[in-house]
Image: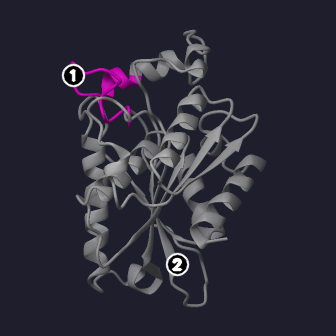
Amino acid sequence: MYRPTGGGGEKLPVLVYFHGGGFCIASFEVPNFHAGALRLAAELPAVVLSADYRLAPEHRLPAAHDDAESVFSLLRARAASVDDPWLAESADFGRVFACGDSAGGNISHHIAVRHGAGRLDLAPARLAGCVMLWPYFAGEERTPSEAASCEASDFMGTVLFDQMWRLALPAGTTRDHPAANPFGPGSVPLEELAAFPPALVVDPDQDVQHDRIADYVARLKAAGKPVELIVFAGHGHGFFVFEPWGAASDELIRVIRRFVHGG
C-alpha cells in the first residue's frame, strides 16, 4: 500500500494496480513497478494498492483474473469495516479504480467485464473506472502492427508475446480464448455489460499491439461504453515501467490524474 506523505486529511481515490509481465514473470517488488507506484501515490495523489497474482505456467489463466477479483473482494470488506486504519483514514471508497500495465491492463479489462456482468459487487465501495496501460490482448488473426514485428530479435515483439500466451492460456486453447481476446467467439459481448465502468486506455504507437489496442477502443465506443484513448507517439510497450522517471512518464501521470480526479 502506498499513500502520499503529509496530506490534510482529505480522502483520496484508491488505485488498485496490477503489474505487467505477460502473466508469467515479475511482481510488485520489481524496483521499477515500485517506483511507478510511488509516483502514482504522490503525484495523482491517490492511495495505491499494488497487487500480486499467481503466475503461469504453474497457474494458468484465469488464475490471475480470479486473484484480482479476490483483491477487490478484500477491498469491499475493508470498505465495510474500520479494521484497517490506513485505509479508513485515507481512502475514498467511492472512487476505486482498477489499473495496470500490459498483463495488468488485461486484468483491469477483465475486472471491468466481471463488474459489468454483475459478477463483482463492490458495495459499499464503487468501481469508478479502469486505467489500462497498453493492455495485453491477442487473437489468432494478426493485426498489421503484430505482423510487422514477427522477427525473433524484435524486442517486446510478436514472437515473445506468442510464447507467453502459450504458457499463460489454458492448455489446448488458442489466442482467441476470452482471457486473451476480448472479442473472441467465447467472449461476453460488450453490449451485454451494463455496468462496464469508464475506461482510460493508453496506446503507445510503437507498441506491437498498437493496432489491437486501437481496435479495442473502437469496439468499446461502438458498444456505447465510455472510453478515452490517449496515444503516446514515438513510444513502445512498457515505457512507464522501463523509464518511470522519463518525460513521457511525466505526461502519463498527468493523463491519469485528469482521469482519476475528473479534469
Up-down: is 32 above or below 177? below
Is 22 situated left or right of 122 in this image? Answer: right
Magenta residues (range): 164-182
Q: Going from the N terminus, do you reach mark 1 or mark 2 first?
A: 2
Position in image of residue 118 (x %, y %): 25, 60
Dot 2: element: strand
Q: Is residue 179 magenta?
A: yes
Instruction: Determine the residue positioned at 59% across, 62% down.
Output: 40
Of all residues, the one furthest to the top in this rendering is: 151
Up-down: is 44 above or below 22? below
Which quadrant holds residue 156? top right
Q: Label 1 vs label 2: CA separation?
A: 42 Å
Which quadrant holds residue 115? bottom left
Q: Say which residue label 2 marks.
A: 12
Please tell me which residue lies in front, 160 or 86. Answer: 160
Q: Which amino acid does label 1 sit on?
A: Ala
